[in-house]
Amino acid sequence: MRWYGERHIPVELNEPHHWGMRDTPDTVFVASAYLSAHNARAFGVRDYIAQLMFNSPSGLSDAMDLAKMLAVIEITKPLLGPDFRIWKQTRTGLLSYPVDPVAARAHLATSVYLQMALRPHIIHVVGHTEAHHAATAGDVIESCGMARRAIENALRGQPDLTADPAVQARAAQLVEETHDLLDAIAQLAPAGVTDPLIDPATLAKAVAVGLLDAPQLRNNPFAPGRVVTRFINGMCVAVDERGRPLEEKQRIQQIMDHLSPMGNF
């Protein structure tokens, strides 16, 4: 990133959706999005492309998916400045397309229409054939045609989907929980580290102890894959051994209790 920054080349990071595609809690997705932007800025990137891949994981409701993306935008806003610009790029989830071609076409159009609620600078069109085969030239042209129509419809006067009180409430909750998670990660840093959120050892430890974790990382040599998630009311949340939603503060405390005999961090 420093090499690109020195040459004024825009940088795009795909970190958040790789967590999302592995069924991570929404809070971890938002935290990884912040860490991506924070590191890009720290290493001299001036034009950062925030990739906002919807439907990752695919069990999210449209409302809660939109809330998660609003949380990403809100929590990264303080990073903006004359030397750091964030360009919003949205796309449809790679693992979210149905195999049926008719349903897949509908999914592409509705997903792009939802993305327009964020007023993205860039729309990355994911071919509607993704679940069935690699897109041909004809598939790409057809997918872009469907996306273009959805964009045109939205630009003619889309209702403000972000104004939904439930969407706003969830976004605010995710911002608060993400700050708790980032604070916990920072406290893993050894003495003398100026910025724990760009320190490789600290970030690696955050993964190793499970602060940054996902169910589909089980048996990964670097992450515990201990967290369990469920889709509840359209959200992807961590749950306890009984399947009940686990508040982020509780999840963090349980992890830290294993690290410190006193249970403090």
Image: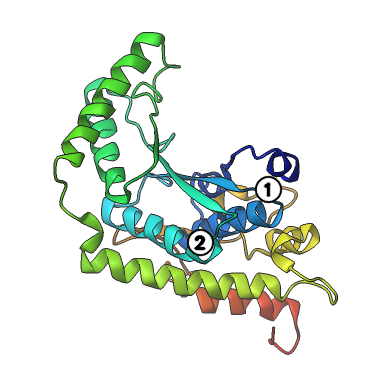
Please tell me which residue is depicted at 20% across the width and 33% down the height of the picture. 152
Secondary structure, mark 1, is: loop
The location of residue 36, given as percent across then percent down, is: 60, 53
- The quarter in which the N terminus is drawn is top right
Mark 2 vs mark 1: give the one in front: 2
Local SS, label 2: helix
Q: Residue 50, percent across and down?
A: 50, 47
Give the residue at mark 2: 76
Q: Which residue is mark 1?
A: 219
Horizontal side of residue 36 vs 262, given as left or right: left
Q: Quadrant of the C terminus?
A: bottom right
In the image shown, does 56 or 14 lie closer to the viewer? 14
CA neighbours of label 1 inside 10 A, class few (<14), some (14 to 19), many (20+): few
Q: 222 or 191: nearer the eye?
A: 191
* Number of residue marks: 2
For the question of whether residue 35 can be seen, the reply is: yes
Structural distance between the alpha carbons of marks 2 and 1 = 32 Å
The amino acid type, in three-letter code, at marker 1 is Asn
Q: Are marks 2 and 1 in contact (CB under 8 Å)?
A: no
